[in-house]
Image (cartoon, rainbow, N blue to C red):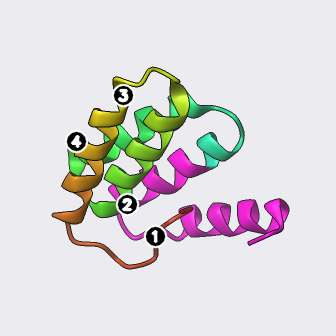
Amino acid sequence: LNCPEAAMRSLQLARQHAGTEPERLVYEGWILYDTGHCDEGLRKAEESLNLQRSFEAFFLKAYALADSSPDPSYSMKVISLLEDALKCPSDRLRKGQ
């Protein structure tokens, strides 16, 4: 979407209607990330992963981690997270991506 307000409203509605706690946490993570709270978004991804491994949670974690530090050593961690994401089932919605 090229309209941040509509994208945010979509994420908020999706969070309200999330079917599971891990899914709700991913939506919350994207909302936090998109509002400039990268570290909090990363924590929501980790909370979600502690409950259930999913493509969406790994993707959020990788995305937030890549954006949180210019340190090149994070690149390998991000790649590893994306590889883990590909091993997980996905609802194909790609929340926030």
Q: Name the one closer to the observer, 18 or 34.
A: 34
Residue beneath the point at 39% across and 43% down = 61
Q: Are marks 2 and 3 in contact (CB under 8 Å)?
A: no
Q: Residues within 10 Å of mark 4 (few under 14, many from 20)?
A: few
Q: Which residue occupies the extreme left position in the image?
A: 87
Q: Are marks 4 and 1 in contact (CB under 8 Å)?
A: no
Q: Could you tell me which secondary element the residue under label 3 belongs to?
A: helix
Magenta range: 1-30
Q: Are marks 1 and 2 in contact (CB under 8 Å)?
A: yes
Residue beneath the point at 46% across and 70% down = 94
Q: Could you tell me which secondary element the residue under label 2 belongs to?
A: helix
In this view of the protein, can residue 95 be seen by the observer?
Answer: yes
Pointer 4 residue:
50
Q: Is residue 5 left or right of residue 84?
A: right
Q: Could you tell me which secondary element the residue under label 4 belongs to?
A: helix
Q: Position of residue 54 (x, y in %)?
A: 26, 60
Q: Is residue 54 left or right of residue 72?
A: left
Q: Position of residue 55 (x, y in %)?
A: 30, 62
- 67 is within the stretch colored magenta: no
Q: Mark 3 is on which residue type?
A: Tyr
Residue beneath the point at 44% across and 49% down = 60
Pointer 3 residue:
74
Disc marking residue 94: 1
Of callouts 1 and 3, which one flags the residue occurring earlier in the amino acid sequence?
A: 3
Label 3 and label 4: CA atoms lie apart by 21 Å
Q: In the figure, residue 90 lies in which quadrant? A: bottom left
Of callouts 3 and 4, which one flags the residue occurring earlier in the amino acid sequence?
A: 4
Pointer 2 residue:
56
Q: Mark 4 is on which residue type?
A: Asn
Q: Position of residue 82 (x, y in %)?
A: 29, 52
